[in-house]
Each structure stands twice: as structure tokens, then as C-alpha cells.
Image: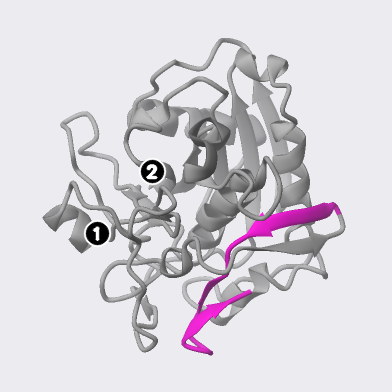
Amino acid sequence: MTRRTFGRVAVLGVATLLALVAATGIASASTQTSTSARATIARSGVMSFDGTGAVAPAAAADLVYGGGFIQDHVAVYLVFWGSQWTGDKNGVQSYVTKFFQGLGTPSDAWSRVTSQYTGKGGSPTFTGPVLKGTWVDSGAAAPSRASAGAIAAEARKAATHFGASGHNASVIVLSPHGTHPDGFPSGGFCAWHSATGGLPYTNMPYVLDAGTSCGQNSVGGKLDGFSIVGGHEYLEAVSDPIPPSGWVDRSGAENADKCAWKNLHKISLPTGSFAVQPTWSNKVHGCAG
């Protein structure tokens, strides 16, 4: 997993993270190695807090293919980790589920910006809802302070539950209110994505706990941060599911890193209206979608 700052939450690229561990910026395929407990986790597309100084990339800084997989047929799986989710009163579970149910449908031009990126397997193709399964793993409470390794283990557990595997499967591990997965929010990030045993997954904290730093009311809704941040990591996993072997720029930034917290807006899907950011397009040498 690479930790990165996303527009509002600047993400650090691999090279930047290694050189400036304490800095904040935008990077998708960054690899952060801060403590021995985290050394085996390459946090990519780390979305940092809004307003932390994300660097605007040059218009000519297009993404370059690294030879690895891309997600040609995206399959998203949501796992709401912990018994605490049974008491969530903010409607987060419904909001996130409806967001991903709408992505991939014919009205979703936003995801299709990634269809220009080809690689192992072809290019991203969207023929229907990308969401293939949801699960509330309520057998026990989610850890108060889950390590990066524990988050990866939960992603593998969820994949087994869903019967999912391979580079096209994208498991999003959503932690409940009041928890601090991988040090959130004191780590200065909103979310990050990585891969474990060839399985792409995302660490998606309860970003409402970080307030406006992770997108609350950015476009006009209390839950905006869940679709802005969750969508950021989702798009990065499409073009770089096993980071950083897919599409990244020469500084290590992934597609969504390069447009983090810029031009936030709402998209209309069959399941509702949701706040998002644009993503990088090599075709226009800038942010699109």
C-alpha cells in the first residue's frame, strides 16, 4: 500500500515518501516504510488531508505504464468491519453501498475515464454495477487501532467470504466510527490502497471522524468525504491494482493523486447524487470526469 495525500488529503509518491517521510503531497503508487510494523505494507495512493499542500502536477506529467495488471473488469467488495456498524446512525453504510452500486452503470462516465489505460488483461470495461458484494463482519468489534497488517488480514478474510480473488477484485475495508486504522487520523491521511497476496484492497477509515479534513460538506453533504475519498482509492485501484506496477507518473503519483481535492463536484448515478473528484486523463493531459 502506498500512503498518499489526496487533494485535500495530499498523497506522497513512492520516491517522495521515501525521501520525505514527514512531508505531505499527492502520490498514488508511493511506498511508505515508517515503522517496522508497517515495513511490509506498501501504501499507495495515500489520500492526505485536504489543505495539506498537495502539489499540482505539470500538464505534461502523464501516467506511464509499468507493465503490471490493470483491472479490466472491476469487481468491488465492501466489508464493513466490526460489530460497531450495527449502531451507525449517520447512514454511512447505505451511502457507500449506493455509491458503488451506481458506478459502472451506463450513466457513469466518471469511471470510464480510466478505460483509456491498457495493460495486462486489456483495458477497464464497465458493463454494469461494479459492486459485487457487501458484508458486515459483525462477529466481533473492529480493533480500536488496527495495524496495517490487520487491515490486510481483514481484506483477505472478506475475499474468502465473497469467494473473490485476483487483480480484478477490489476489497474495501471500512472501519467504524471511533477507530483508528493504521493510525488514522493522526497520520494525516484519509485512506490508502495496497495489495496483499495479489489481492487489491483499500483501508477506508470512518472519514467523518476527521471532519472537513477528509471531505465533510465539501460539495454540500455531510457524507461527501466517503465518496470523494472512497472514489479516489477506487479509481487508483482500477489503473494500478498492484501498486506501483500499473499506471503512475514519473514521480510515483497515481491517476487520482494528480487531481486530489481539485474541482470537487457531484455526479448523478441511478442510485443517487454523489460528491467526487476528477481523475487524470492522458488523453487531455489533465483532470477529467
**Is 77 placed left or right of 70 in the picture?**
right
Residue 71 x, y percent position in the rendering = 55, 63
Residue type for callout 1: Val
Q: Badges 1 and 2: C-beta atoms under 8 Å apart? A: no
Q: Nearer the viewer, mark 1 or mark 2?
A: 2
**Residue annotated with mark 1:** 14
Q: Is residue 280 magenta?
A: yes
Q: Residue furthest left?
A: 19
* Viewer-proximal residue among 264 and 162: 264
Residue under the point 44% across and 16% down: 144
**Residue annotated with mark 2:** 189
* Viewer-proximal residue among 117 and 60: 60
- Callout 2 crowding tier (Cα within 10 Å): few <14, some 14–19, many ≥20: many
Q: Is residue 104 visible?
A: no
- Callout 1 crowding tier (Cα within 10 Å): few <14, some 14–19, many ≥20: many
Q: For the magenta stretch, what is the residue range?
A: 271-289
Q: Residue furthest right?
A: 270
Q: Secondary structure at mark 2?
A: strand
Q: Is residue 112 magenta?
A: no
Distance of label 1 from label 2 (alpha carbons):
15 Å
Residue type for callout 2: Phe
Residue 63 x, y percent position in the rendering = 39, 78
